[in-house]
Image: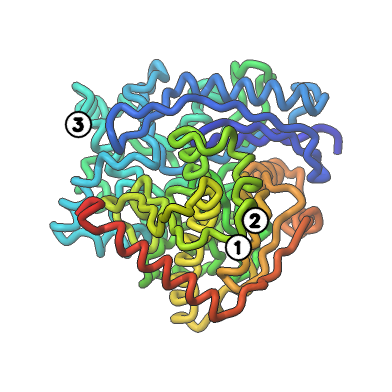
Amino acid sequence: MPGYILAIDQGTTGSTAVVLSPEATILGKANREFPQHYPKAGWVEHDLAEIWASVTASIAAALEAASVEPKDCLAIGITNQRETTVLWDRKTGEAIHKAIVWQDRRTAPTCKRLKDEGLEPRYRERTGLVLDPYFSGTKIGWILDAVDGARARAEAGELAFGTIDSWLVWKLSGGAAHVTDATNASRTLLYDIRAGRWDEELSGPLGVPLALLPEVRSCAEVYAKTAGVPGLPDGVPIAGMAGDQQAALFGQTCYELGDAKCTYGTGAFLLQNVGESFVASEHGLVTTIAWRLGGKTVYALEGSSFIAGAAVQWLRDGLGLIASAAEIEAKAREVESAGDVVFVPALAGLGAPHWDPDARGLICGLSRDTTAAHLCRATLDGIAFQIADLVQAMNADVSRGGGRGLSRLRVDGGAAQNDLLMQFQCDILGVPVDRPANIETTALGAAYLAGLGAGVFADLGAIQKAHRVDKTFDPAMAPGDREREMRRWRRAVARTRSDLGAG
């Protein structure tokens, strides 16, 4: 089949466009970064005009790199930073406030109040989530209270809410569609993932009018067609959509029960396919929708570490220990190990399985012998230790239901290119780690879904045939050493709540 699929991966720090052939070969890709805005400590915002500029620029550059014609685009797939929250005017399309990013912690007091009111069990049971500032619902309420007249306008149906996927479909279609998919809906604290609907008993305590919310659709169907998009013809079907981590799970072809992947980006995100039955976590994870296709919903257990690649950026921008993120592996290899140094990268609180928004980052074990290389190595180790915590919790949840623990992990994302990090991840988990030939699996997942939605791919089997593993890392650490390393890590995590931290 002639033509190509265009995938838009709108991430936390940049937008990536990928051009994929109908044979699942990447023909071209491009990334454009955009600024981060930090108006107060713990607050993170994005300017939507800057995001849109990065999206259109990445599309133009990817099409040029692929040497394809805009008119030959068969379908567009979207994947996105998930919980980042946008409210806009339905008539003008203008945002009423900067987007509040998933990392933002300003609604921690709201989450505490709701917990104190005894509401968390309701949210856990229906949404699979915990009450944490990470998710969208409390962000929506904050904007409605902070912007003059916004609440009245929302109740009157004049405003629209969306995560970035919804906003992108709105922009790409010239305002013709206000939709989201089941995966993004499942990250809002407003959506009953068992019943498959927005829930007024969830939205009410958060102060979110149902009139704000988009229509929830499957992950592969035609939602709308392009209209007035710079560099693209009108009429291209927008046919696939999933939140970034679910798209990566799909792009890694984790279609079988028990398949799991970890994506290393700004944060690190572990997801495991648990099939068509809702599995409630008792060990600090969340249950989420992996995808919805053909009327069937597949669920996943998920654990999120808020800081992964962002810790490397902090070494570069905050401490000046490295000139670029790519330098960290070479610097870390200057020493055989981190020695006694442990870095807990709780720079935005701790996510799963701890869910402690007040935790703060901690570096311990310093001595006169400590060098920049030790700090670099401890940073990579800290990223891997966080994933080990998540795997331990996931194994406990899965085994409770009679399943088996993780036997293999598929990895992707920018930091997955770091061989030193991947080997330590493999060692500390004690299971093989597979890195695919193409680590752009988030964008691939969006492209695969769009291909299914537009009829370019016949079924999942056609996608699986195209998946290739580039390298497998096998564990080399002795079990005793592994347990000793984990004990040091756990002691350090416990200290993130000491008097030196948040108290």
Name the residue beneath numbered marker 2: 420
Could you tell me if residue 239 is visible in this image?
A: no
User: Disc 3 on helix, strand or loop?
Assistant: helix
Disc 2 residue type (three-letter): Leu
Where is residue 352? Give x, y as percent: 39, 60
Relative to 243, residue 474 above or below: below
Disc 3 residue type (three-letter): Asp
- Residue at x-position 50% and y-position 83%: 402
Picture quarter with the C terminus: bottom left
Q: Residues within 10 Å of mark 2 (few under 14, many from 20)?
A: some
Which residue is farthest bottom? 402
* Quarter of the rendering containing residue 30: top right
Relative to 284, residue 159 above or below: above
Q: Which mark is residue 424?
A: 1
Q: Considering depth in this image, is 189 or 218 the residue closer to the camera?
A: 189
Q: Residues within 10 Å of mark 3 (few under 14, many from 20)?
A: few
Name the residue beneath numbered marker 3: 145
Q: Residues within 10 Å of mark 1 (few under 14, many from 20)?
A: many
Q: Which mark is residue 342?
A: none
Which residue is farthest left? 117
Task: Give the CA separation, mark 3 to mark 1.
Answer: 46 Å
Q: Nearer the viewer, mark 3 or mark 1?
A: 1
Picture quarter with the N terminus: top right
- Residue at x-position 78% and y-position 34%: 4
Disc 1 residue type (three-letter): Phe
Q: Considering depth in this image, is 184 or 272 the residue closer to the camera?
A: 272
Marks 2 and 1 in Cβ contact (< 8 Å): yes
Task: Give the CA separation, mark 2 to mark 3.
Answer: 47 Å
Task: Give the CA separation, mark 2 to mark 1.
Answer: 6 Å
